[in-house]
Image (cartoon, helix red, strand yellow):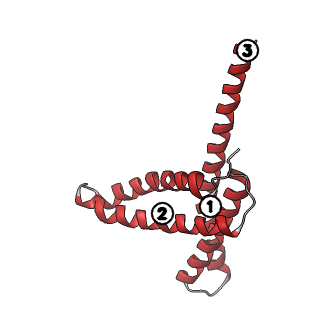
């Protein structure tokens, strides 16, 4: 029957979208966890200054994030064109966070906490939009 066939296609489409968003969230949660673990490990096993240990851990976590989003979330072969766009998106996300942290306190009480909550909510959505529409725009299935 055509109706059952159409319903099956809709269900498969919804399932694919849910799996896609789940993959995005998984990478989004594991990236800061990896950063924290790497920072802790580097801090405990080396004599590096904290800022250097943090920078190294952050760089490794961002590389992990790029590869996971390429291969796992968006299912594209990692390459320089994707990486450059990815780095630009990360930089724009940092800039957006800075702007929100500076501007929100002008209108909101409990400025730092509210600003941080807004940043945690807005930045991943901002990144998701740019990742899916620009950085890895080839496909997400």
| Residue where numbered disc 2 is placed | 93
Locate the N terminus and report the quarter of the image it occupies.
Answer: top right
For disc 3, the neighbor class at 10 Å (few under 14, some 14 to 19, many from 20) is few
* Residue 16 image-quadrant placement: top right
Between marks 2 and 1, how big is the CA–CA gap? 15 Å
- Is there a contact, CB below 8 Å, between mark 2 and mark 1? no
Foreground pick, 66 / 129: 129
Q: Is residue 37 visible?
A: no
On the picture, is 126 further left or further right than 31?
left
Q: Is residue 6 above or below residue 78?
A: above
Q: Earlier in the sequence, mark 3 or mark 1?
A: 3
| Residue where numbered disc 3 is placed | 2
Residue 69 at x, y percent in the picture? 67, 57
Residue at image coords 62%, 78%:
56
Foreground tag (3 vs 2):
3
Residue at image coords 67%, 32%:
13
Between marks 3 and 1, how big is the CA–CA gap? 44 Å
SS type, badge 3: helix
For disc 2, the neighbor class at 10 Å (few under 14, some 14 to 19, many from 20) is many
Q: Which mark is residue 17?
A: none
SS type, badge 1: helix
Residue at image coords 62%, 61%:
31
Residue at image coords 42%, 57%:
119
On the picture, is 86 further left or further right than 99?
right
Q: Is residue 53 visible?
A: yes
Between marks 3 and 2, how big is the CA–CA gap? 45 Å
Q: Is residue 74 above or below residue 11?
A: below
Q: Is residue 37 above or below residue 29?
A: below
Q: Earlier in the sequence, mark 2 or mark 1?
A: 1
SS type, badge 2: helix
Q: Which mark is residue 31?
A: 1
Residue 134 at x, y percent in the picture? 57, 56
């Amino acid at each position: 029957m055509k109706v059952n066939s159409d319903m099956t296609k809709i269900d498969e489409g919804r399932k694919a979208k849910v799996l896609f968003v789940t993959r995005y969230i998984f990478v989004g949660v594991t990236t800061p966890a990896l950063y924290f673990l790497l920072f802790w490990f580097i801090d405990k096993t080396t004599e590096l200054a904290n800022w250097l240990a943090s920078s190294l851990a952050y760089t490794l976590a961002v590389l992990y994030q790029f590869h996971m989003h390429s291969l796992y979330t968006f299912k594209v072969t990692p390459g320089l064109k994707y990486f450059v766009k990815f780095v630009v998106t990360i930089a724009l996300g940092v800039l957006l966070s800075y702007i929100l942290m500076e501007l929100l306190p002008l209108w909101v009480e409990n400025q730092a906490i509210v600003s941080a909550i807004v940043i945690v909510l807005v930045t991943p959505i901002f990144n998701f939009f740019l990742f899916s529409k620009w950085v890895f725009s080839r496909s997400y299935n």
